[in-house]
Image: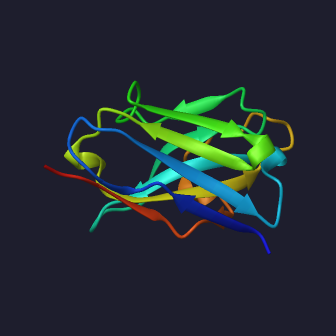
Amino acid sequence: QLQLVESGGGLVQPGGSLRLSCAASGFTLDYYAIGWFRQAPGKEREGVSCISSSGGSTNYADSVKGRFTISRDNAKNTVYLQMNSLKPEDTAVYYCAAERDYRGFITTILPSDYDYWGQGTQVTVSS
């Protein structure tokens, strides 16, 4: 069964850092683009970042550019989101999702484009 499991969330002070992981089981991530999304209470789910299956293309929401970095280790079947200079407005449940990407160039961060979703991990930025 295809599963994505997020980890690495927690409570951090403003200006701090966290690294989220998205581990896949039941399938290999080699042919999937992986996106990170977040949803704050009372708000719609929004795209944060995406990395193509090849790892050669990435995309970021304007709100996180220069602070977040997405990467992947296909040997470990895992995708990471390094989050630096965190702000209170980054507080949300963070989800990873997978979309088939056989050609290696998908970088969409629209939630509706993704088929497989993890359960999410809470990130809280507060002093």
- The colour scheme used to paint the residues is rainbow
Indicate the quadrant where residue 4 lies: bottom right
- Residue 116 rendering spot, x and y as whole percentages: 68, 64
Horizontal placement of 33 versus 9: left or right? right
- Hey, which residue is sitting farthest right in the picture? 102
Please, is residue 95 above or below residue 29 in the view?
below
Between 52 and 23, the one lying in front of the other is 23
- Residue 84 rendering spot, x and y as whole percentages: 36, 33
Q: Residue at x 45, y 63 (%)?
A: 121
Total numbered labels placed on residues in the image: 0
- Residue 49 rendering spot, x and y as whole percentages: 52, 41
- Hey, which residue is sitting farthest bottom in the picture? 1
Q: Residue at x 24, y 47 (%)?
A: 89
Between 110 and 53, the one lying in front of the other is 53
Horizontal placement of 31 versus 34: left or right? right
Q: Quadrant of the N terminus?
A: bottom right
Horizontal placement of 74 versus 114: left or right? right
Q: Residue at x 50, y 49 (%)?
A: 20
- Residue 81 rendering spot, x and y as whole percentages: 51, 42
Please, is residue 30 above or below residue 41 in the view?
above
